[in-house]
Amino acid sequence: MDALHVAAAISVNAVELVTNEKPERSIHRTKSIQVISIWSNSNTS
């Protein structure tokens, strides 16, 4: 599902993708678009 979200964002020429996925999740490894998480460092454990 993450790949579909990234592909959709790229297809509409988005500059960034905002997600609720934690920063250690695979969606953050993409180089095609900047991925921003709503999780702060203090929320991850």
Image: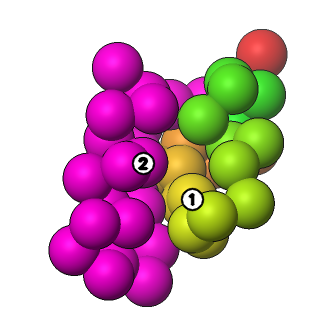
Secondary structure beneath disc 2? helix
Q: Which mark is residue 6?
A: 2
Q: Is residue 43 visible?
A: no
Residue occupying the point 77% across, 28% down:
24
User: On the rendered structure, is 36 left or right of 41?
Assistant: left
Residue occupying the point 63% across, 64% down:
32
Crowding at dot 2, Cα within 10 Å, few <14 / some 14-19 / many 20+, comes out as: many
Relative image position of residue 41 (x, y in whole percent) = 75, 44
What amino acid is labelled 1 in the image?
A: Val
- Residue 32 or 19: which is nearer the viewer? 32
What amino acid is labelled 2 in the image?
A: Val
Q: CA distance from mark 1 to mark 2?
A: 9 Å
> What residue is pinned by disc 1?
35
- Looking at this view, name the residue that lies furthest to the front: 11
Give above or below for 27 relative to 30: above
Residue 27 in magenta stretch: no
Relative image position of residue 45 (x, y in whole percent) = 77, 16
Q: Which mark is residue 15?
A: none
Which span of residues is magenta-colored? 1-22
In this picture the colour scheme is rainbow
Secondary structure beneath disc 1? strand
> What is the quadrant of the N terminus in the image?
top left
How many numbered marks does the figure carry? 2
- Residue 17 or 1: which is nearer the viewer? 1
Relative image position of residue 13 (x, y in whole percent) = 32, 81
Q: Is residue 16 visible?
A: yes
Residue occupying the point 53% across, 50% down:
37
Label 1 or label 2, whichever comes before in sequence order: 2
Mark 1 near mark 2, Cβ–Cβ under 8 Å? yes
User: On the rendered structure, is 29 left or right of 19?
Assistant: right
